[in-house]
Image (cartoon, rainbow, N blue to C red):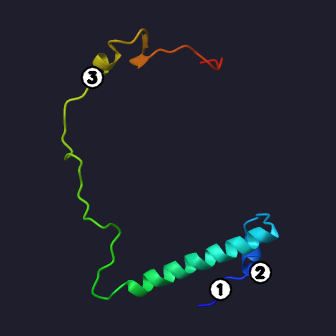
Amino acid sequence: MSAITRDEVAHLARLSRLALADDELDHFAAQLDQIVGAVARVSEVAAEDIPPSSHALPLTNVFRPDEVRPGLTPEGALSGAPAVEEDRFRVPRILGEEA
């Protein structure tokens, strides 16, 4: 596999609208080359007898099952409100709009 060049890093920087100094181009070229090499090594390790997975351990749903439970009635919900109007909470007008 060929190494990532300064020109490729400069091209990526232009596409990303990043201003990089000359020393940064060399630094990032070396880092990107190491990253690409590491990804290539991981793909070499994958064996055909190992199924692909997204997690190392199996996941199970930890939520409780949905159950219908009695909820608040409108009267119960509004019982502690300081002001009620037409079965709704009455709040101060903040936008100054006419109703």
Most extreme residue toward the bottom, as rendered? 1
Q: Quadrant of residue 94?
A: top right
Q: Position of residue 26 (x, y in %)?
A: 73, 74
Q: Is residue 38 left or right of residue 62?
A: right
Q: Nearer the viewer, residue 51 or 96?
A: 51
Q: At x 67% / y 82%, what residue is drawn?
A: 4
Q: Quadrant of residue 35?
A: bottom right
Q: Amino acid at mark 3?
A: Thr
* Secondary element at image label 3: loop
* Secondary element at image label 2: helix
Judge whether 49 appears above or below 55 on screen: below
Judge whether 11 appears above or below 62 on screen: below
Point out the image quarter for the N terminus.
bottom right
Q: Residues within 10 Å of mark 3 (few under 14, many from 20)?
A: few
Mark 3 or 2: in front is 2
Q: Position of residue 39 (x, y in %)?
A: 50, 79
Q: Amino acid at mark 1?
A: Ala
Mark number, residue 3:
1
Q: Position of residue 76 (x, y in %)?
A: 28, 17
Mark 3 or 1: in front is 1
* Secondary element at image label 1: loop
The answer to which of marks 3 and 2 sits earlier in the sequence is 2
Q: Which residue is mark 2?
A: 7
Q: At x 33% / y 77%, what residue is drawn?
A: 52
Q: Nearer the viewer, residue 7 or 95?
A: 7
Q: Residues within 10 Å of mark 1 (few under 14, many from 20)?
A: few
Q: Which residue is mark 3?
A: 73
Q: At x 23% / y 58%, what residue is drawn?
A: 60
Q: At x 62% / y 75%, what residue is drawn?
A: 32
